Image: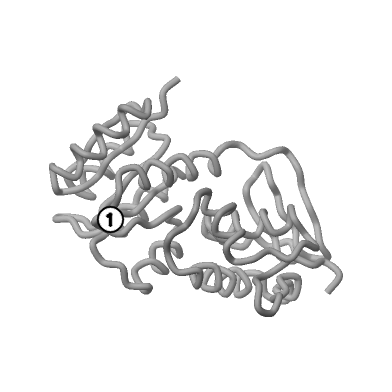
Amino acid sequence: MAKKLLIVDDEKNIRNVINEYAKFEGYETDEAEDGMEAVEKCRTNNYDLIIMDVMMPRLDGFSAVKEIRKTKQIPVIMLSARGEEYDKLFGFEIGVDDYVTKPFSPKELLARMRAVMKRSAAPEKEILSFEGLTLDIPGRSVLVDGKDVALTPKEYDLLFYMVNNRGVALSREKLLSEVWGFDFFGDDRTVDTHIKMLRNSLGDYRKFIVTVRGMGYKFDERQ
């Protein structure tokens, strides 16, 4: 069955370009002109992925994502003409799965879409524990001393990848390639930013995420 995509942007030309490439890729597509329309459509339809612009009339993209996430956990890729780090961090904090700065390459956007869809597929049924840190893989949740921790989708993907490769020193480039799902052309400080966010979320168990000087990071449960 074809995956269903919701394209949200107040610029018709942008919607048309994404629509054309997405249909060629095999997606079934739907469109919305602003965040308010996107929220309404998500209430009555099921989507596998949302491409959401940030700056739109009536309701901006960030607000729309927060509203949609109250009832549905649909993967979201944000589009924005603004590339400031603050905007990206805010997007990741509210649960955005990826962030693309305009102008963008349609082929790159498709690669990001494939990566997000792959990461959103149901994981193997497994629960891993390291002292008081528990990863509930089927439930896609993390517990710290028995309490749920609200991780962003990207924090979860990063943590699970590192845990799955525990004890292995992983370069920033490797993490970008594997966790983001394709050859990332941005600044590798993206990894450092997410590691910082993840450590803050894990509290005392931040000790398991070890910095490998001059290279990257590794998950080491022996700490």
Q: Amino acid at mark 1?
A: Gly
Percent across and percent down for residue 190 are: 49, 68
Left or right? Give the position of 7 relative to 159: left
Left or right? Give the position of 188 relative to 162: left
Left or right? Give the position of 223 relative to 104: right
Q: Residues within 10 Å of mark 1 (few under 14, many from 20)?
A: many
75 or 66, nearer to the observer: 75
164 or 47, nearer to the observer: 164
Which residue lies under the disc numbered 1? Answer: 61
Which residue occupies 23% across, 58% down? 60
From the viewer's perspective, is residue 60 above or below residue 48?
below
Q: Secondary structure at mark 1?
A: helix
Image quarter in which the C terminus is found? bottom right
Percent across and percent down for residue 180 are: 52, 53
Which residue occupies 60% across, 68% down? 198
Q: How is the image coloured?
A: one colour
Left or right? Give the position of 179 relative to 204: left
From the viewer's perspective, is residue 182 above or below residue 217?
above
Farthest-out residue, bottom = 213
Which residue occupies 42% across, 64% down? 186
13 or 1, nearer to the observer: 13
